């Protein structure tokens, strides 16, 4: 079922922002319904940051970057604010959505200098 996420690639950001892609990814790949924290895409990075940190109870931090697994989340700081999230696919690849490119697969290494943390969904069986 890991390849089911491929249908998300190319989805415009206006349809699903970075967290919207994560929600859809978890539904398609793991059959897990993650909480939605907003009805509209946040207009500011500070609002996005507040939403991310207010939802941390649904996730647990992975302290060792070498321990991340398929489906773990990557928190990214854009313009100095923790306001972007991606999902780890393995082999140094991540799935995410940006305003300019929509949903794409990119190398984690390209974003490494902006990564501030790795997280695992608590509802996920792999969180043990």
Image: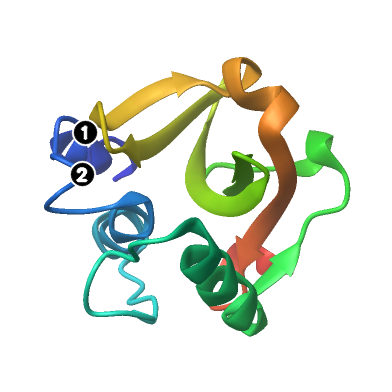
Residue 47 percent across, percent down from the top left:
48, 70
Res 50 → quadrant: bottom right
Q: Quick check: 26 above or below 89? A: below
Disc 2 and disc 1 in contact, CB within 8 angstroms:
no
Q: Residue at x 54, y 78 (%)?
A: 123
Foreground residue, 85 or 71? 85
Question: Between tags 2 and 1, which lies in front?
Answer: 2
Neighbour class for label 2 at 10 Å: few (<14), some, many (≥20)?
some
Neighbour class for label 1 at 10 Å: few (<14), some, many (≥20)?
few
Mark linked to residue 6? 1
Q: Give the residue pinned by disc 2.
A: 13
Foreground residue, 78 or 119? 78
Foreground residue, 91 or 50? 50
Q: Is residue 71 visible?
A: no
Res 96 → quadrant: top left
Residue 90 percent across, percent down from the top left:
55, 29
């Amino acid at each position: 079922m890991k390849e089911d996420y491929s249908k998300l690639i190319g989805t415009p950001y206006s349809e699903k922002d970075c967290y919207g892609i994560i929600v859809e990814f978890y539904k398609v790949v793991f059959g897990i319904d993650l909480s939605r924290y907003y009805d509209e895409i946040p207009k500011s990075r500070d609002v996005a940051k507040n939403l991310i940190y207010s939802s941390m109870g649904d996730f647990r931090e992975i302290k060792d970057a070498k321990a991340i697994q398929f489906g773990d989340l990557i928190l990214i700081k854009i313009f100095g604010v923790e306001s972007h999230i991606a999902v780890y696919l393995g082999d140094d690849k991540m799935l995410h959505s940006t305003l300019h490119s929509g949903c794409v697969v990119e190398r984690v290494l390209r974003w490494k200098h902006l990564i501030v943390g790795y997280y695992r969904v608590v509802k996920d069986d792999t969180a043990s």
